[in-house]
Amino acid sequence: MTTMNKGIQGLKGKGSQRTMLEGALVLIVIALALVIRTKLPGGELRAVSTIFMFIALSQAWNIIGGFTGYASFGQVVFFGMGGYFTAVVMLKFHFSFWLALPLAGVFAAVFAALIGQPLLKLKGHYFAIATLGVAEGMREVVINLPDLTGGGAGISVPIAGTFAKTQYLGDAGFYLLFLGLALFAVGIGTLVSRNKFGYGLRAIHQNEDAAAAVGINTVRSKVMAYSLSAFITGVVGASYVFQQVTIFPERLFDVEITVLMIMMVVIGGSGTVVGPLLGAIGLQFISEYLREHFTNVHTFILAAIIILAVILIPQGAVNYFREGRRTKDYSLLANIRRYRL
Amino acid sequence: MKKTPRTSAAIIAASCLAVFGINAIPAASAADVVTITLGASVPLTGSLAKEGLLTKEGYQFCQEKVNALSTATIGGKQKKIDIVYQDDTSKPDVAAQNLSKFNDKGIKLILSSYGSANVNAQAAVVELNKQTMVDSGGADDAIFNKGYTRTFNVMSPASEYATSMVKAISEMAKPKPVTMAFLSADDGFSKTVTLGGMKAATALGFTVIGPQYFPNATSDVSAALNKIKADKPDVILGSVHFVEGVAMIKQAKELGITPKSFAQTVAPPILDFATTLGPLAENVLGSSQWSSVVKGQEKYFGKASNYASEFLARFGHEATYHNAEASAACLAMVLAIEKTKSADADKIKTALSALDVQSFFGRIKFDSTGQNTFKPMVVIQIQKGKIITVWPRAIAQAKMIWPYVK
């Protein structure tokens, strides 16, 4: 008994030590990000803001796609809806951006809860295609409501003058906004990863019938995960719209944004918190570097890197290193054999 | 050879120089030359890659001509221009971000991207960064009604695209048609074109039908065609891009819709239009920013016909209006640099505001919003597979064939 108590106390000690370490790490990252903000010029700040944006988006996708195992190929619908909600309420109803921001998240989350009821009954490819259809459909809805959304001609949010309740934030301001969203999304991802709700999602991912058999309300859990994921994606879409000022449905509902989220999660490590974080930073940084330095062949090189990454480490970078640490074997050949052969 | 740490360091340093292209040794003639760098973010990949490449060719051609022929000096040194390119992947956010990165590097003079959405995003950033941009790829009037003062568009405004064809039909079509139906893609540029055309048509006494909108870049415009079929319009005027333009001609034939004339923006002047549609393309009217018979000349490109022949020799294909408008934008920037003998963005902006030149591209002069409202567009017609300028009369290569649909 005494030994067991000591063991539990030891685990608790290790847990609190880990929490303290993580807290310190977060503070260091924030301090570093704030220092970088003062050192970088405007164009670089904009580029780093995009990295923060994709950190938040990949974390959001990871909740439904990584933890729960429901690959949402139409995730961009929440990005677009959050964005258009913000543009419409700021332009037509003169909302401040700071009020529109959380409401955009709620709007996207409620929409996710509504469509989630029927969609989340589908599995695998069927779910993926259905979500893709929803995103494409919503883009058409936005295009066909020109009086409200500007349709194909686009819509501009007021950033100056009497109708602008919130002044434009500038490159430094948006850097802080997207940094905040990235931290928020990583925080949510960490919470989900470590609490009962998150364990339930993982159980659903492993075997949904077994999860239901042990008492997990799978429908409620899936809808909650989908809504939470949509909330984060919606607020990111809202921020993106304010940054861009003029928006068009083709970009706000661009399937490429979903594809990027998925690639970042898969390459970084699906179902982990660190994986999407590293995937977003790595992929966006490489993409940006290649575009700037290899103007004519950047997409070719990026595609080759992604193909190689998926072939060599299909389980994602984080899971690869975890397995390597456990087995003391980091051989890529062995990894290919393990996952491909 | 035994490698010492110093040797290894030298090898590493040399490798870094080779890999990252760091040029530590100035060119021998650098003392006699001042190079002014222009930034150009163009779509080299993505949905606008084709037009982006044509735009880049236009800029390249301008750089080569100017550097070969220019005798202008700045501070006693020979002036050269260097254009730095970035791919904006056909996305407005990347197009805007690229300009901010140019600004970080001190590049204040910008040649625009292609596409109204891209240029719209760029114009806002140009204003924030106090850069100066000459636009060759975004004609939507919406870009210029926001009070921006640092973006100048060498092209005729979007509202002129359909208006020019309405005027041409009104002047030259005998017997004069009565009804004119407007079909349009739903993007901002196309809508502006349509509204401008409808206004002109009403003013010139036509009975206007529509507008009927369809999604941008769609290959199915049959729903819009069906809605106007019962009205039996004399003219169907489409504010379209290439894909919708081709679809409109094909599907009208399939649906048995036979107006006296089809007129379309943007699509017919593209070389592929006639080759894709074959006989169906015959006699379709189109509006174009430029043709090789446009009047005007200047010292770098000479006349429009010179531009066309030299461009063909350089790039191996006929110059399109995309090429020409890009070269014209670059030309406007170069002339402003020569006028001010500086690369200062504010001075260039002032010089551009006062610029007035008759070039191979027609007149380049900007109104208070930055638009070139002084240059008329030309109307072309596909005749025996060739793009023939039919309006304005003064530069027409042949008479407009009318009516043509039997």
Image (cartoon, rainbow, N blue to C red):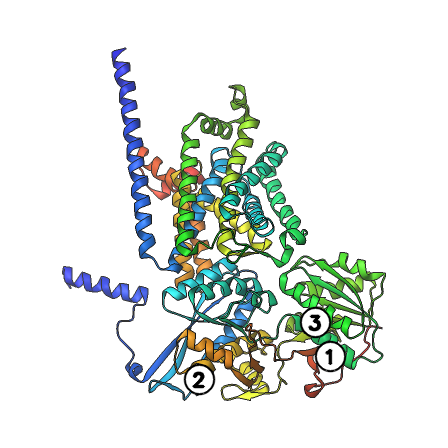
Q: In this view, which residue lies farthest toward the top? A: A1
* Residue B76, horizontal then vertical, whole percent: 33, 87
Q: Is residue A89 above or below residue A20?
A: below
Rendered image: mark on residue B339: 2
Mark 1 or 3, nearer chain start: 3
Q: Chain of mark 3?
A: B
Disc 3 secondary structure class: helix
CB atoms at circles 2 and 3 under 8 Å apart?
no
Q: Residue B383, which numbered label?
A: 1
Instruction: Give the mark toward the camera: 2 or 1.
Output: 2
Q: Quadrant of residue B276?
A: bottom right
- Quarter in which the C terminus of chain B is drawn: bottom right
User: Where residue B309 sits in the image (x, y, percent)?
Assistant: 57, 85
Lower sequence index among marks 2 and 1? 2
Q: Which residue is mark 3?
A: B162
Q: Position of residue A105 (x, y in %)?
A: 53, 41
Task: From this view, report whether residue B111 is shown above or below residue A179.
Answer: below
Parent chain of label 1? B
Viewed as shown, does residue B211 lie left or right of A273?
right
Residue neighbourhood size for the residue with mark 1, other residues' Cα within 10 Å, grouped as few (<14), some (14–19), many (≥20):
some
- Disc 1 marks a residue whose amino acid type is Gln
Q: Are marks 1 and 3 on the same chain?
A: yes
Secondary structure under the numbered disc 1 in the rendered image: strand
> What residue lies at 19% left-to-right and 64% top-to-bottom?
B10
Query: Based on the displayed image, in which of its 4 quarters is residue B67 positioned?
Result: bottom left
